[in-house]
Image (cartoon, rainbow, N blue to C red):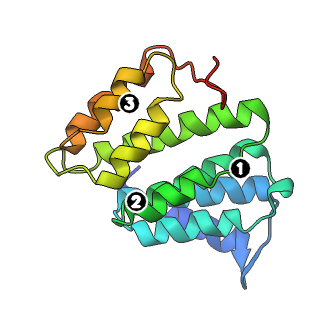
Amino acid sequence: MPEEEAMQRWEALFARTYADGKWTCNPDSAGLVTSLGWDQAMRAERYADAEALARLFLAFDRSQCDGVSWEYHWFLLGSAIIMQGRVREAIEHWESFEPVGTFGARSASVSARNELYSCLCSSDPNQSADPNLLAFVSRLLLKFKGCKRAAAKALVAATNAELLVQLERTYKDGTTRDSAGKE
């Protein structure tokens, strides 16, 4: 489907499900609508629109939503923020996530890694890596099994491409450590 048609279809869906500042559907359906719109906005490089859609979904009380959708939108919001060049704000946002249970802590690390990886893939590989991002990636890498050296290398990465190489080291088996450093 052409991008323009996809956007028109999404806009019609959004108009049917969100009117006068209120959702006319349940949170699960709203999650689908906002994630589809977020994707359209990100592809069109309309990052402020993507941010607004993620925030719109996150306005739901977390207890009203399924945990996966809420967490997913939390990390989508960080991606929209970082793509607008607000690196420190995105990091603070991602790090303020409050996981629910052990699964939440592990999936939060994986979600942060995945969103950050996607953002870095969309950036100029030769761009100097932001110092705040280096520290965040280093802390994130320590949560993955066998990535202590990668965490150290991330602290001195000069470019986004070098930072991507270190993040790629987490994809070998996907195992994360819990907050105590145990697998």
Which quadrant of the rendered structure holds the C terminus?
Answer: top right
Q: Whole-percent x and y of residue 82?
A: 40, 59
Mark 1 secondary-structure assignment? loop
Answer whether residue 169 is visible to the viewer in this image.
no
Amino acid of disc 3: Ala
Q: Is residue 94 above or below residue 125?
A: below
Circle 3 residue? 151
Amino acid of disc 1: Glu
Circle 1 residue? 98
Give the mark nearest the N terminus, 2 or 1: 2
Give the mark nearest the N terminus, 1 or 3: 1
Answer whether residue 3 is visible to the viewer in this image.
yes
**Mark 1 Cα-neighbour bin, 10 Å: few <14, some 14–19, many ≥20:** few
* Residue appearing at x 47%, y 55% in the figure: 91
Label for residue 82? Answer: 2
Q: Is residue 47 left or right of residue 54?
A: left
Amino acid of disc 2: Ile
Q: Nearer the viewer, mark 2 or mark 3?
A: 3
Q: Is residue 161 left or right of residue 146?
A: left
